[in-house]
Image: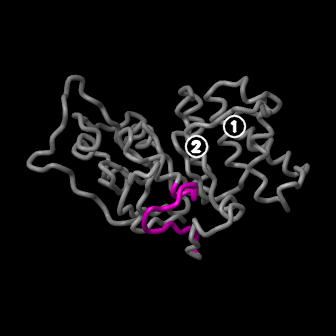
């Protein structure tokens, strides 16, 4: 479990988010939605311990351990993060990148990868659908394939909490569905996942709970079927949105209206925050 309390997030010396209350429960997939620049990446980086909080604190687990007071090794055993973008300056083999996920389980920085580490890394790449890339240099694969490599690296950490920042941004449709199906399988086994995603319909299909960011705060949050509605979406994204059921699953799906113009809430300058401070 990750819990953010009165969390303030900053980046580059600028306050990005304030007063964030967020709970990520085991076995749940939580979507993090909002316009460009709303702070999704900054929030994930703060929750992951990469950025220090500007205010408040982030705890993890039943012991409510402070994420930012943990050693890097302990944090890596608890929380795995897949970034939105990755630098590929060095032409490492894909298997070497995935094996980086094992360092937190080794005895020291200079420890060599064991046969068990290699077996687990190969299994993680197989789960991510990229076992065939084992020996390929990362500078010779596509952006979507690289995202799968980074996801396999996160799996290799064997952490029970996943923080995913636009994990399918460069993937094709089949790869996107396959990755989210895998995240759902992991959730069924008790893993928790927070996913920042621009495709709000994808979030509605897979996420149990949604948090919407706007104007530096959590503008709305709650179970997906409760908050994925026309009023909330139109307010958050500033344009008219219609919502209807998915023909296969019945999950709510958004339909943007061409020429709908900017959306202004009737009689108010902003929509109220929905739900309590945590998930149901």
User: On screen, 206 above or below 274?
Assistant: above
Does the magenta run of residues contain 50? yes
Instruction: Name the mark on residue 254.
Output: none
Q: Earlier in the sequence, mark 2 or mark 1?
A: 2
Q: Nearer the viewer's eye, disc 2 or disc 1?
A: 2
- Residue 192 lies in quadrant: bottom right
User: Looking at the image, can residue 279 be seen?
Assistant: no
Compared across the picture, whether 214 is left or right of 62 comes to left
Residue at the far bottom in the pictured view: 63
Residue 187: percent from the left, percent from the top?
57, 54
Mark 2 crowdedness (10 Å alpha carbons): few <14, some 14-19, many ≥20: some
Q: Residues within 10 Å of mark 1 (few under 14, many from 20)?
A: many
Expressed as whole percent of the image width and height from the top left, the position of residue 240 reads: 22, 34
- Residue at 60% x, 36% y is 178
Residue 221 seen in this snapshot: yes
**In the image, which residues are magenta?**
46-62
Which of 158 and 178 lies nearest the eye of the viewer? Answer: 158
Q: Label for residue 83?
A: 2
Image location of residue 27, percent across then percent down:
55, 59
Q: Residue at x 32, y 36 (%)?
A: 254
Q: CA distance from mark 2 to mark 1?
A: 11 Å
Image quadrant for the C terminus?
bottom left
Report the side of 35 relative to 151 (left or right). Answer: left
Which numbered dot is residue 149? 1
């Amino acid at each position: 479990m990750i819990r953010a309390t009165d969390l303030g997030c900053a980046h580059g010396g600028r306050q990005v988010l304030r007063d964030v209350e967020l709970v990520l429960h085991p076995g749940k997939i939580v979507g993090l939605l909002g316009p460009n620049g709303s702070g999704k990446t900054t929030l994930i980086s703060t929750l992951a311990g990469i950025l220090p909080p500007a205010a408040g604190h982030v705890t993890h687990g039943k012991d409510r351990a402070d994420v930012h007071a943990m050693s890097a090794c302990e944090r890596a055993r608890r929380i795995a993060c897949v970034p939105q973008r990755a630098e590929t300056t060095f032409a490492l083999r894909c298997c070497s990148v995935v094996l980086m996920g094992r360092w937190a389980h080794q005895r020291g920085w200079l420890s060599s990868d064991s046969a068990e580490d290699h077996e687990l890394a190969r299994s993680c790449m197989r789960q991510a659908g990229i076992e065939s890339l084992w020996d390929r240099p990362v500078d010779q694969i596509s952006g979507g394939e690289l995202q799968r490599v980074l996801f396999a690296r996160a799996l290799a950490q064997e952490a029970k909490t996943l923080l995913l920042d636009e994990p399918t941004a460069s993937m094709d449709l089949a790869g996107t569905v396959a990755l989210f199906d895998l995240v759902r399988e992991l959730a069924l086994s008790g893993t928790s996942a927070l996913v920042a995603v621009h495709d709000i319909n994808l979030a509605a299909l897979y996420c149990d709970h949604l948090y919407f960011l706007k104007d530096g705060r959590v503008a709305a949050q709650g179970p997906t079927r409760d908050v994925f509605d026309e009023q909330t979406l139109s307010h958050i994204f500033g344009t008219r949105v219609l919502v209807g059921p998915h023909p296969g699953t019945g999950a709510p799906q958004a339909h943007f209206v061409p020429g709908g113009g900017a959306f202004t809430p009737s009689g108010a300058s902003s929509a109220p925050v929905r739900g309590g401070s945590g998930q149901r």
